[in-house]
Image (cartoon, rainbow, N blue to C red):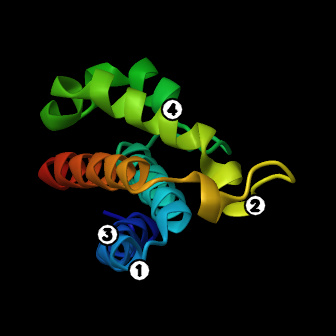
Amino acid sequence: MDKLTEDYIKRSELRLKVLDFYLSQNGYPDAVRESQELVELLLKAVLRHKGIEVPKTHDVSKTIIKYIEIMPPAIKDNIEKIASISKYLRKDRELSFYGEEDFIPSEEYTEEEAKRAVESARFVFETVKKSF
């Protein structure tokens, strides 16, 4: 495993720890945003590890699906769920961070939405961890 891939994994582990803090402080939009970043880093780590050029996009699920034959079994077995998680978290990436005039992140994101994002990120983390 190269150093950059190792760094992605290490930074993902740190983000995973921070998610519980955000939830405990009612930082729901931040929990959503960090969950997305965690998933993005993990999936890009998988691509790098397999020698696949990492696209400059926040949702790399299409690339993983394209190369599914060379993905580790844990990824193959859960690809539909992983792709779904990556896509739905990607949609909230900017909105959870910046908001809009008519969408104040701290007012809009609920505990339920944040917990869903965190659980999704945990699932991807555990799945990717089995792959290394």
Going from the N terminus, do you reach mark 3 or mark 4 first? 3
Q: Secondary structure at mark 1?
A: loop
| Residue that numbered label 2 is attached to | 98
Disc 1 to disc 4, C-alpha distance: 26 Å
Disc 4 to disc 2, C-alpha distance: 19 Å
Q: Quadrant of residue 98?
A: bottom right
Quadrant of the drawing holding the N terminus: bottom left
- Name the kind of residue labelled 3 in the image: Leu
Q: Nearer the viewer, mark 2 or mark 3?
A: 2
- Name the kind of residue labelled 1 in the image: Gln
Q: Position of residue 115 (x, y in %)?
A: 32, 54
Going from the N terminus, do you reach mark 1 or mark 2 first? 1
Q: Residue at x 60, y 44 (%)?
A: 92
| Residue that numbered label 3 is attached to | 16
Q: Nearer the viewer, mark 3 or mark 1?
A: 1
- Name the kind of residue labelled 4 in the image: Lys
Going from the N terminus, do you reach mark 4 or mark 2 first? 4
Q: Residue at x 70, y 52 (%)?
A: 94
| Residue that numbered label 4 is attached to | 87
